[in-house]
Amino acid sequence: MSALGKFSKIRRLNGNDDVETSPGITTDPNHTIFIGVLTVSDRCARGEKTDLSGPYLQQILQEYTGFRSAIKVYKILPDESDEIVATLVDWSDNLNLELIITTGGTGLGPRDITPEATAAVIERETPGFTIAIITASLKVTTDAMVTRLKSGIRGKTLIINLPGSKKASSECLKVVLPAIPHAIECLQDVKARICICTSVDDYPDVEEIKKNSNDAHVIKPTIVIQTNSGSLEPQGHSQFQSQHHVSLPERTLINFSEEDLADADVDLESLLSNNATNSSTEIISKKEEQEFPPLSVQGALDTVLNTTATLKSEEVSLAGAFGRILAEDVSVIQQNQTQTAGSSGYALAGSVLAGEIRNINTKGVSINYDQARQVSAGSRLPRGTNTVVSVRDTRLLVGNKIQVIQNVRSGQGVQNSQLSNSLRPLVKKGTKLGPAKIGQLTTKGITSVRTYKNPVVAVLSVGRQDIEATNHITIQSSLRQHSVVPLDIGIISEEKEILFASISQAIAKADVIVIGSKSEASRDVIRSLIRNKFEAIVHFGTVSMLPWVPSYYATTRYETDRKLFFVLPECPLASILCTLYIVPALRKLGGLENTKNTVIKAKLSNDQPLKQDPEYLQCQVSWRPQETVPFVENIGINLGEQEAYDASAILVLPAKSNQLSLLRKGDTVDIILIRSV
C-alpha cells in the first residue's frame, strides 16, 4: 500500500468546523488495527481462576470510537518466559498484528516476568506510553510505584504491558488509546503529511516548506495543491498539471512526496470532489485490507479454547449422569483399624509351631509367610503380618534367622486400636461417566453425583428454505456424529427483525449457537447483527486452510454466561469445522480436561498434489490385511457426489513447499477421526 492509502480524507473546512489547522497526520477511520490480547497468569492458565481482564480489554477496544479495531487472537499463558516470548514473536512476525496488549505479570512477585519477556522481544522501547501509564496510575494509587511494565516495538508491531487486575488494566488502556492510531501510522512508515488551511493567510510559503523540510514527514520535492474559491491546480508535477483540473469550495494545501504520488493509483478528480454536499474527500488505496487476516488452524483452535470456560456444575441423579463429567471427587467412607505390637518381638504371619524357623526381613515393605520382622512394643505391624512372638519365645540363629520355641496362635501378641473412618476417593473429578463407573457407584449405594452441565447447542440456518434445507440437516448430523443432540431453531429468512428474534431465542436456550448459510452475503449480515445487536466480539473470520471460505467465530455475554457463535458456510466445510473447532469447545464447556481430537497416522491410497495452504478433506478409513495402519479412501467425499458416503475421518494435507509438492500413494499422513473405524 502506498503512503496515500494510509489517509482517509482531505477534510473540507468551514468557519464552524472544530479542527486543527496545524500540519498533522489524519487517521483513516476505515483502517482496521489488528490486535492481539495476551493474558499472563498461572492460575488462569491452569483453569483455577476465570480471566476477567483479557475479555474486558477486548470489549473496551471494540467499543472505542477513536479507531477501528479487530481482535485477531486472544490467549492465556502461564508465567513462563519462553512461552510468552514465543507468542509475542509469532504474533508480531507471523500474524503481523499491529498492536499487542498484555495483561498480568508486571509486579514484583517472583513469577512476574512479563516485562523481561517483552524486553527480550522488542527492538526499541516506547517510554512515552510507559510514562503516561505510570503517571496516570499514580494519580489513582501509590501502588502504581511497584509496576515494572514495559512497552516497545518489534518490526511494525506495538507491544504494551498492562497490569493484571481488571480495574487497573482497563484504566491504563484508556490512558494510551488516543495515541495508538498515530503510533501505528508511524510504524507503518507513513510519509505523507496533510495540511489544512481555512484562509489564504494560513497558507505556508511553498519555498519555505522546501527550504525548511527538516520534519521527517515533509519530503522534498513537495507537491502543493491549492484552491481559492474556484480552481485547483497541482504545481510542481507535470503529470498532474496536464491531466487534472478540479474545483473545491475551500482552500486546501497538501504535501506529499513525489514518490508517493507516482506510486499511488488514484484519480485526483475523484479524490477532490467539488460536491458541496460531500463533507469529506477520501483517498482510497489500490488494495483494500481484509478485516480478518487468516489465522493458522492451530491458532484458531487456541483462540476458541482460550475464550471458552467450563460450565457450572449441578447435582444430577446417577441414572441421568451417563456421558457427563464429574465436577468433584466421589468418595466413600472407609473404616480403618490399626494393629500394633503388644510387646517387643517378631511380627510374622499366621500361627507358628514350636521349632519353626523364620528368616528375618529387614528391608521389604511386605512380609512373606516364611519371614519375620523385629518390632517394638506399640509399633504398627508390617504389612502381611498379624501375629507377634515375644523375644523370650524365640532363639536367634546364625544367618539372620530365628527359631520359635513355643507354639503361637494366629493373632497372638497383637493389640487392635479403635476403628476410625476416612474418606477414600472412589471416582475422581474430571472422569467421564460411562457404564462401568456408574455401575461402580451404584454398588456403593450412591444415587446422585455433581457433574458439569452438558452444553446445549442451537442450530439455525439463514436463507431460503429450498436452498438451506440440505445444509441445515447436514450440520445437525455432523454434530450428532459426536454424540451432540442439537436444538433445532429452524431455517430463518434474512429479514433482520426475524433473524434478531431467532438468535435471541437461541442465546436464551443454548451455550453454543451454530449458524449456517451458503450465502456469503447472509454470513456478512449475521456477523454484523451479532456484533452490533448482541455486542459480540468477532475473534476470527478466516483460517489458513483449504477449502477456503469465510467463517466466523464470536463470543458475547448473556447475563452471567458467555455464549459462543460459530457462523459456518455450506457443507462439507461446515462438517469439517464442526470437528475442528466446535467439538473441542463442547468438550471444554462440559468439563473435559483433554479437549483434543484423536489424530492417527494413515496411508494414502492415491497420489495427492499439495496446495499453497493446508488442506482438510473428508474421507473414509479402512483396514487392510497384514497392514499395521489404516488406509485413506474416498478423499474429498461430499453429498454432491453421485454415490454418497459417510465420512469417518478428516485428512490433513500439509501446505506445498519447495521441497514437497506431491504426496505419493502409500505415504503416511495425519487423519482426524470423526467416528470409530
Image: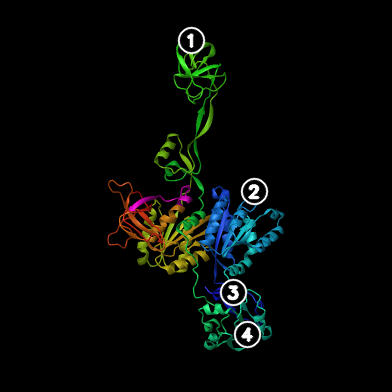
Q: Position of residue 222 (x, y in %)?
A: 61, 81
Q: Which residue is mark 1?
A: 406
Q: Can you tell which mark lies on residue 251? A: 4
* Mark 4–mark 2 distance (CA, rounded to whole Å): 59 Å
**Amino acid, disc 3:** Lys
Disc 1 packing (10 Å; few <14; some 14–19; many ≥20): some
Q: Secondary structure at mark 1?
A: loop
Horizontal side of residue 651 vs 135, given as left or right: left
Tag 4 and tag 2, C-beta contact below 8 Å: no
**Amino acid, disc 4:** Arg
Tag 1 and tag 2, C-beta contact below 8 Å: no
Q: Could you tell me which residue is drawn at 55 percent across and 52 percent down?
A: 82
Badge 1 or badge 2: first in the primary sequence? 2
**Amino acid, disc 1:** Gln
Q: Which residue is mark 3?
A: 191
Badge 4 or badge 3: first in the primary sequence? 3
Badge 4 or badge 1: first in the primary sequence? 4
